[in-house]
Amino acid sequence: MIGTRGTALAGALLVLGLLAGCGDQPLPLTEGPPGASPADGLIRVVQLSAQRAQVSDQVAAAKFGTGAAVTDPAREAAVVAQARADAIRDGVDPDWTARVVADQIAASTQVQNDLIRQWTDRPDTRPAQRPELARVRPQLDRIGDELVAALKLTGPARANEECPSTLAQAAVEQAQGLDEVHRNALGRSLKSVCDGAPG
């Protein structure tokens, strides 16, 4: 079951970059029971994932030219541990939450690496300012807090076989305003969202 759903999502997200530039509109998102839409939680997760990918630009700018490593294992472990604790508090599967947050971190790392390579190869594209990392991290923390709350709302959609296609449709719509770097990161960040089903 998980393998089939994961494969379906991977295939859907693989075409995200192509679909995002097309004029065709995504199919309507799956409707839920009367008075509720199981897509709502997924849409919010996609929105927050896109925000996190874009804030990663500031993280990259803060590190660029400083010699600081893109990856920070201690900080990343702390972020995942905090998300796990928040999930337990809010009644969300902590293992699943940890996988989703780890994917978010991997997507951020991908953005940072892509941008740093671009800025190294093309000095004219370098950011004009270098923000302080300590001032950027609260934005990431806020998104992380909201992400756990959004994951709690995904229960109905996650339990549905159409979760991968519903998630991909939301991602395609969100990707309309993103460039290739951030479209790719968005796809990476959503890898585990439809894993399994809520217990």
Image: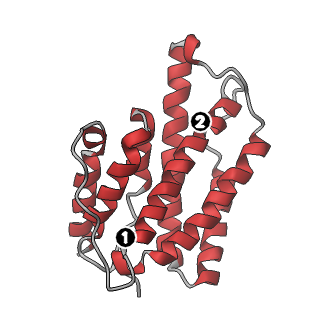
**Split into 4 quadrants, where in the image is the C terminus?**
bottom left
Give residue 26's position: percent from left, percent from top.
25, 53
Amino acid type, mark 1: Ala
Q: CA distance from mark 2 to mark 1?
A: 28 Å
Where residue 164 sits, quadrant-wise, is: bottom left
Tell me the residue that label 1 is attached to: 39
Mark 2 or mark 1: whose residue is earlier in sequence:
1
Judged by depth in the image, the label closer to the viewer, 2 or 1, is: 1
On screen, 88 above or below 180?
below
Which label was assigned to residue 81?
none
Q: Nearer the viewer, residue 169 or 13?
A: 169
Report crowding for label 2: few under 14, some 14 to 19, many 20 or more residues within 10 A (C-alpha): some
Give residue 167's position: percent from left, percent from top.
33, 62
Give residue 34's position: percent from left, percent from top.
33, 86
SS class of the residue under badge 1? helix
Q: Nearer the viewer, residue 72 or 184?
A: 184
Left or right of 132? Residue 125 is left
Give residue 163's position: percent from left, percent from top.
30, 70
Confirm whether residue 105 shows in the render: yes
Tell me the residue that label 2 is attached to: 57
Where residue 141 sits, quadrant-wise, is: bottom right
On screen, 50 above or below 37?
above
Left or right of 119? Residue 142 is right
- Tell which residue pokes out farthest to the front in this image: 35
On screen, 66 above or below 74?
above
At x 65%, y 46%, the residue is 72
